[in-house]
Amino acid sequence: MGAHISIPMYQRSIGQRYRLAGQKCQACGAIHFPPKAACKRCGSLAGFEEVGLSGRGKVYSYTVIAGAGAPPEFTLEAACRGTYPVVLVELEEGPKIIAQMVEEPEDGVKIGMSVEAVVRRIYVEEDVIRYGYKFRPATE
Amino acid sequence: MAVGIVSYGSYIPRARIARTEYQKAWGSCGADIKEKAVPEFDEDTLTMGIEAAKECLRNSPTVSIGALAIASTSFPYEEKVMSGTVAAMLNLPERLFSTEHGQSTRAGSEAFITAAQLLGNGNGGQALVIASDAPRALPKETIEHGLGAGAAAFVLGTEDIIAEIEYVNSFISENMGERYRLAGNSFLSDIGVKGFTGIAFNELVTKAIQDVLQHLNRTAADYDFLVVQETDGKRVKSLAKKLGFSEEKVNPGLLYAQIGDTGAASTMLSLAAVLDEAKNGDKILLVSYGSGSGSQAVSFQVIGNPVGTQRLSLRKKLENKKNIDYVQYLKLKRQIM
């Protein structure tokens, strides 16, 4: 059973998924991704302004999806790639986020390696292409 | 008002399939490629175009973009405002004059020229052009062997120009049976008569070039670079020779042997490769071709030294690759999935 995300739900989050739109607390300046209702650091409800995150960061931890471990919406991709890594990345701006890794090094993912976000097709459901971010090794 | 290129970017997917893989699978390879670029399973013409655009926009704010023109013969959706997706991904303003081009491989230059003319008419400070393509045909068709992938993007503007657009033209004529796709088909067809299509190509490209030379009162010798749509590995070279353009002027733009036929992105990628090498004062002549048929020419004068030393040239990017075999290729093309 996959984690079905309806089209309206996906649509509401395209700022995050398409361009890593984060939020900056207007009270203390903390940066959050994905958006929160209240600031995680100071608890303020003062509101947030949208900030575009750089997508650059370092691998904080990772796992490798293998065998039949992929959720159903990723079955085809798993069959094509064999195994694929999923990384927890600590972004330059602070937030930690999870995504697939592409173009991984031949000798495997390393904790601490520099990565950058890239827009890819995540999966197709209900005949609608779901785009979003993945990570790859930093190019510079 | 002078309009020209302000910055440019390009993207070539990393996966490559070599000619020898086709020879192993089919006994021969029907295209003059050494290897060609293949999109990954999770890439399409939209994601490739976004990569090229991001490189192009790296050092420039997007708020002054007032026009967006995108081109591909293989958009991920046949009907949908694709420029809306592009704008959401690049955080472009919503008030944007956008056009989408995709009826033939000439679409790249159509987008480029349209964007330039929108700027000339005063629609916003800068325009973004994205040409991205990964044409498809069934594996059993010879035309499939040469089909590659890639994307290029340009910011056009009226200030801080690195290559000014001097003149543009367009020619069309009726040529049946040459590389086409009927409504509802995902895969290209071709009646397979190379000589016939070669004649149409030569005629229309020659007309476009001669019109530029005549209009600007120049000869082939006045140009430093010639970029022509690469439909195979031979036509451009032999036609350029016939028209008096030396090899040194043609070679910098030739990409077919390494990445294959990139359709609507072909001339735009070659232009990016040529700009990497161009110097102040150089003149560039670009001619696109779309089967069925049409051609368009754009003449450029390089102003300043466009080469960005802080980033990889297109030729350098080609070295970042990963070879795949024919079975993996069929998987990536979703032929056996």
Image (spheres, rainbow, N blue to C red):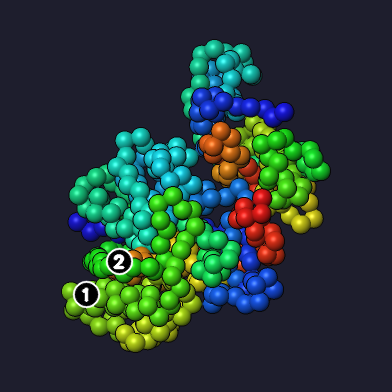
Q: Nearer the viewer, residue A122 or B104?
A: B104
Q: Position of residue B223 (x, y in %)?
A: 31, 78
Residue placed at 37% from the left, 60% from the top? B104
| Above/below status of A21 relative to B290 | above
Tell me the residue that label 2 is attached to.
B294
Residue placed at 26% from the left, 57% from the top? B3
| Above/below status of B16 relative to B195 | above
Residue B154 in sight from this viewpoint: no
Residue placed at 79% from the left, 40% from the top? A68
Specify few, some or many for label 2: CA neighbours under 10 Å numbering under 14, 14-19, or 20 or more.
Answer: many
Q: Tag 2: residue type?
A: Gly
Tell me the residue that label 1 is attached to.
B211
Which chain letter matches label 2?
B
Residue B125 in sight from this viewpoint: yes
Q: Earlier in the sequence, mark 1 or mark 2?
A: 1
SS of the residue at dot 1? helix
Q: Tag 1: residue type?
A: Asp
Which chain letter matches label 1?
B
Horizontal side of residue B285 vs B234, given as left or right: left
Measured Cα–Cα span from mark 1 to mark 2: 14 Å
Q: Position of residue B203 (x, y in %)?
A: 29, 77
Q: Position of residue B16 (x, y in %)?
A: 63, 64
